[in-house]
Image (cartoon, grey):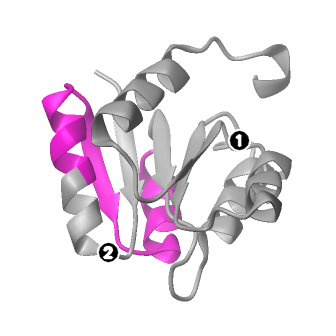
Amino acid sequence: MASVLVVDDDPVIRELLAVNLELEGYDVRTAGDGAAALAALAREPVDLVLLDVMMPEVSGWEVAARLAADEATAAIPVIMLTAKAMETDVRRGGELGVARYVTKPFDPTDLMATCAAVLAEEPTEEDR
């Protein structure tokens, strides 16, 4: 069973995502901000991170950058899940190496399919 960390400062979205992921059979953990996410990942890595961008103190951008820079977490795929839909934001996600960039509002069924697809991808030599 794959583990997923859901990081969003909106408790309603966190709960919606957690319920949908659990129904799909994932082991779900949640964090309400970027600092809590980094602390959780330092304690116990996961197989996938669903990450909001706009959060207090430590933004999703900063979390993604720190994950990519740390050898222990660099191979964990990140799906950005955000209301920031400008092309510059999508490009920034790509520059940070996120696996997918999903904008809010989102269709939970489509997002579950995206999670499954990302988790099914074989890591490249660059990711190892």
Instruction: Determine whether, in the image, residue 100 is placed left or right of residue 33.
Output: right
Q: Which amino acid does label 2 sit on?
A: Asp
Which element type, helix, strand or loop, lies under badge 2? loop
| Magenta stretch, residue numbers | 17-44
Q: Which residue carries the number 2 mark?
A: 10
Tell which of 121 and 113 is nearer to you.
113
Image point 39% across, 50% down: which residue? 106
Image point 19% across, 25% down: which residue? 25
Answer whether residue 43 is magenta in the image. Answer: yes
Q: In this view, does 48 lie above or below 12?
A: above
Q: What residue type is labelled 1?
A: Ala
Q: In which quarter of the image is the N terminus?
A: top left
Q: How crowded is mark 2: few (under 14 residues within 10 Å), some or many (20 or more)?
A: few
In the rendering, which numbered label is found on residue 74?
1
Real-space Cα distance between discs 1 and 2? 26 Å
Q: Nearer the viewer, mark 1 or mark 2?
A: 2
Image point 25% across, 37% down: which residue? 21
